[in-house]
Amino acid sequence: MAGSSKTTGDGLLVEFSSVVDALHCATEVQASMAERNATAATDNRIEFRIGINVGDIVVEDGDIFGDGVNVAARLEGLAEPGGICVSARVQEDATGKLDLVFVDLGERALKNIVRPVRAFKVATGAVSATAAGTPALPLPDRPSIAVLPFTNMSGDPEQEYFADGMVEEIITALSRIRWLFVIARNSTIAYKNQSVDVKRVSRELGVRYVLEGSVRKAGQRVRITAQLIEAETGVHVWAERFDGSLDDVFDLQDQVATGVVGVIEPTLRQVEIERARRKRPDSLDAYDLYLRAWPLAFVAMPEAADKALHLLEKAIAIEPEYGAAHAFIAWCYHTRYLRAGLAEEARLAALRHAHIAIATGGDDATALAVAGFIIGIFERDYETAFNAFDRSLALSPSSALAFGLSSLIRAWSGDDASAIEHAERALRLSPFDPLSYNPYNALAYAHFFAGRFDEAASAAGMAAQANPRFSIPWILRTAALAKIGRIDEAKASAHRLLDVEPGFTVNSFLGCNVTSAERLAEIGDALRAVGLREM
């Protein structure tokens, strides 16, 4: 039952004697408005936002005011058009008394309210007529993402600039990833200070993924949270928290943006690979074929490489100048050369496709990084290789793939210090990347060549964990353990090596020619020491 009430311009403030009465009235109003709007012309539709709170009020001279009213007013601002937003006290008092579903929106910093308020959205089943009448934009032919305005949970309006700057940095960094379709900030800013349904964002902006987050400041410390959501399913693909100091705001923004993008790129790539796997073979285009080939190519063993080549050849038949597909064909031929007999035709094919990748994929960070790696390993043309890596990182400064592959070439070129620096940068950007075995292998090589055999054995062990089907980590681990006299462990590692690559010989490794003969010879001597056969 309603008690006191007043009108406020285009709004209405009503006092109820019970939470149940207030919620029952609110849901009836929204359901009736949705029904009315469904048959009304767009220009004649009216949509309400409703906020409900429980708290002390003051009634004086026909007016209602107090903190309880102020919180309700701020909750109304969080509600979607046609929606209802309530405080935690309302949710607690109403649970089990009404057939309603409450969606937890977390703690929110509300303007002029000292403490954060935990808010809930009421899932009434009523749909905004405006939203329902908006046709869904088609999804683009590549992964698409919208970065929503981050919520300022500091209770400090001056921190709005920091939250907005954070979003702008992330959008700019994501936009450098060529295979990702990123919605401009001018479009996403429309969702600022709204409680947003990600499915609605997906429909209105035509995106598959939504990134949302919050910023909370306490003194000179700030905490940033971010979460990546697959809009169609509502599944949280990734979430992370970043803590830092506001001593240098712009440096902190750059660090967080780099960290977020460094993790999002491989995470989205893996999700997209799984999506491509679910598609019917007769519906695959060049991009889907490329995605299906990716995990096979990076097993880095010849049987998987052959399967990847079959898919990639189909991709370039559809799109002949697909730079990234040519780069991965080069990668697969590199695998066939090193792990399947050192056939010269495989090496030449790898180089041919690597040069095509650089010629056709000049604006694709992945194509440049992989092609640079192939040219560095097979032609020892380090100038071209490092130029390709530099161009790749200029396009995508957060590319763990580029840093990881660069670290390997630098280790083989004799620049152990830079190899370690790039490998550690790759692992810091994306510590759980399925391709992390590349920088770990680079660390193993660099530490081995520098005489730090304990560190080499440890890094090789991490590489083997990341890709246990790849023989190189077992080679490096075996050699490093032998050098420090842990012969029993070295022999166990050699046994694992032969499980992965039964035809392995010391001469086959020495013939791979990835670095100087002197450096390879030291590894070869260590392998012989544990009884691995010469030929």
Image (cartoon, rainbow, N blue to C red):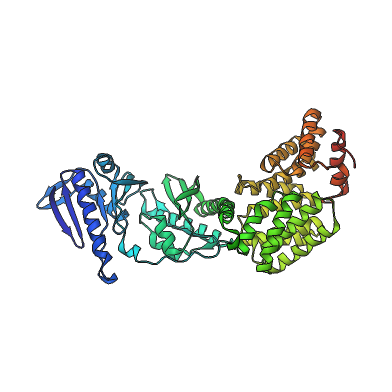
Q: How many marks?
A: 0
Q: Nearer the viewer, residue 142 or 108?
A: 142
Which percent across, then down, holds residue 327?
71, 61
**In screen coordinates, is 81 left or right of 273?**
left
Which percent across, then down, holds residue 37?
26, 65
Q: Quadrant of residue 353?
A: bottom right
**Would residue 149 be seen by someone viewing this image from the given angle?**
yes
- What residue occupies the far left of the structure in this picture? 61
**Would residue 452 be seen by someone viewing this image from the given angle?**
no
Q: Quadrant of residue 458?
A: top right
Q: Nearer the viewer, residue 67 or 402?
A: 402
From what the image shows, is residue 46 above or below residue 120? below
From what the image shows, is residue 96 above or below residue 356? above
Q: Nearer the viewer, residue 409 or 142?
A: 142
**In screen coordinates, is 149 left or right of 379?**
left
Residue shown at 29% from the left, 70% from the top = 42
Which percent across, then down, holds residue 315?
66, 64
Residue shown at 57% from the left, 58% from the top = 280
From what the image shows, is residue 181 above or below residue 420? below
**In screen coordinates, is 373 left or right of 230?**
right
Which percent across, then down, holds residue 434?
64, 47
**Quadrant for the C terminus in the image:** top right
Q: Nearer the viewer, residue 344 or 56?
A: 344
Residue shown at 21% from the left, 56% from the top = 29
